[in-house]
Image (cartoon, rainbow, N blue to C red):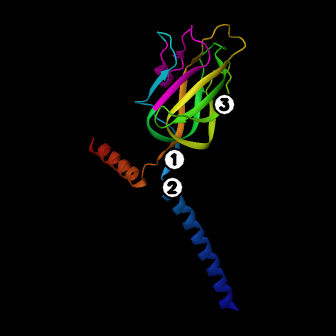
């Protein structure tokens, strides 16, 4: 009887060890992580623009600068983001022009890999009176190079046809830095500190 109890305890510990091993290996083998993507090198173009408020300002990280469509151009207005390579996009973030509750209230989002043929992702509501970033999750995630935002409807307070946007951020999947690289980097950092 004593041998049976010992055997049962052994099986319980063995099962726990296998379970822990499985969880750990799944974590280590996942090589993708969801992050806000670095926009360095990206470009932006638009259906129209004002001389001082260019499309590229939506990628500069500064909410005090903004793209605005030309005052004489009619709705809809579009903005095209080129990420320069295919990326699995999980979310976008939009920030409106600060302190101006006009602009657009509804937009269409599309994705493309060649910049010519676009696939609809969805039509979404946007609040131009909210001055913090508004996040929109893509479900399912899309593997695209280009993202096209088309402003479809203007705010009720908008008298003209102009629209604007301060920031366009993208969250997506990118390769996780290997643990060995992180360890080597930390070790190298310690060696440099000792050398000083």
Q: Position of residue 45 (x, y in %)?
A: 47, 22
The residue depicted at 57 percent of the width and 7 percent of the height is 72
Give the residue at mark 3: 123
Answer whether labels 2 and 1 touch (C-beta < 8 Å).
yes
Q: Could you tell me which secondary element the residue under label 2 belongs to?
A: loop
Give the residue at mark 2: 30
Q: Quadrant of residue 196?
A: top left
Q: Residues within 10 Å of mark 2 (few under 14, many from 20)?
A: few
Spatial CA span between label 2 and label 3: 32 Å
The residue depicted at 60 percent of the width and 35 percent of the height is 120
- The magenta stretch is 53-82
Q: Position of residue 79 (x, y in %)?
A: 53, 23
Q: Could you tell me which secondary element the residue under label 1 belongs to?
A: strand
Give the residue at mark 1: 33
Answer whether labels 1 and 3 touch (C-beta < 8 Å).
no
Q: Nearer the viewer, mark 1 or mark 3?
A: 3
Judge from the rendering whether residue 84 lies leftward or rightward of residue 127; answer left or right.
Answer: left
Q: Position of residue 46 (x, y in %)?
A: 50, 20
Spatial CA span between label 2 and label 1: 8 Å
Q: Residues within 10 Å of mark 3 (few under 14, many from 20)?
A: some
Q: Sequence-wise, which precedes: disc 1 or disc 3?
A: 1
Q: Quadrant of residue 192?
A: top left
Q: 36 or 168, which is in the foreground?
A: 168
The residue depicted at 62 percent of the width and 16 percent of the height is 75
Q: Nearer the viewer, mark 2 or mark 3?
A: 3
Question: In the orientation shown, which residue stands out farthest toward the left?
Answer: 195
Question: In the orientation shown, which residue stands out farthest toward the right?
Answer: 156
Residue 38 higher or lower than 194, as above or below: above
Q: Could you tell me which secondary element the residue under label 3 belongs to?
A: strand
Q: Position of residue 125 (x, y in %)?
A: 69, 27
Q: Is residue 80 magenta?
A: yes
């Amino acid at each position: 009887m004593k041998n049976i109890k010992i055997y049962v305890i052994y099986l319980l510990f063995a099962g726990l060890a296998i379970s822990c091993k499985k969880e750990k290996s799944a974590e280590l083998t996942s090589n993708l992580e969801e992050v806000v993507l670095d926009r360095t090198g990206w470009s932006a173009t638009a259906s129209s623009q004002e001389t001082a408020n260019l499309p590229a300002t939506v990628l500069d990280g500064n909410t005090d600068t903004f793209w605005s469509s030309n005052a004489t151009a009619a709705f809809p207005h579009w903005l095209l983001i080129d990420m320069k390579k295919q990326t699995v996009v999980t979310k976008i973030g939009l920030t409106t022009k600060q302190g101006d509750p006009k602009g657009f209230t509804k937009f269409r989002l599309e994705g493309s890999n060649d910049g010519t043929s676009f696939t609809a992702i969805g039509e979404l509501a946007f609040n131009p009176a909210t001055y913090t970033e508004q996040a929109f999750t893509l479900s399912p995630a899309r593997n695209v190079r280009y993202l096209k935002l088309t402003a479809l409807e203007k705010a009720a307070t908008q008298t003209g046809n102009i629209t604007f946007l301060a920031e366009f951020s993208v969250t997506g999947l990118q390769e996780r830095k290997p643990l060995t690289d992180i360890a080597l980097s930390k070790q190298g950092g310690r060696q440099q500190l000792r050398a000083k």
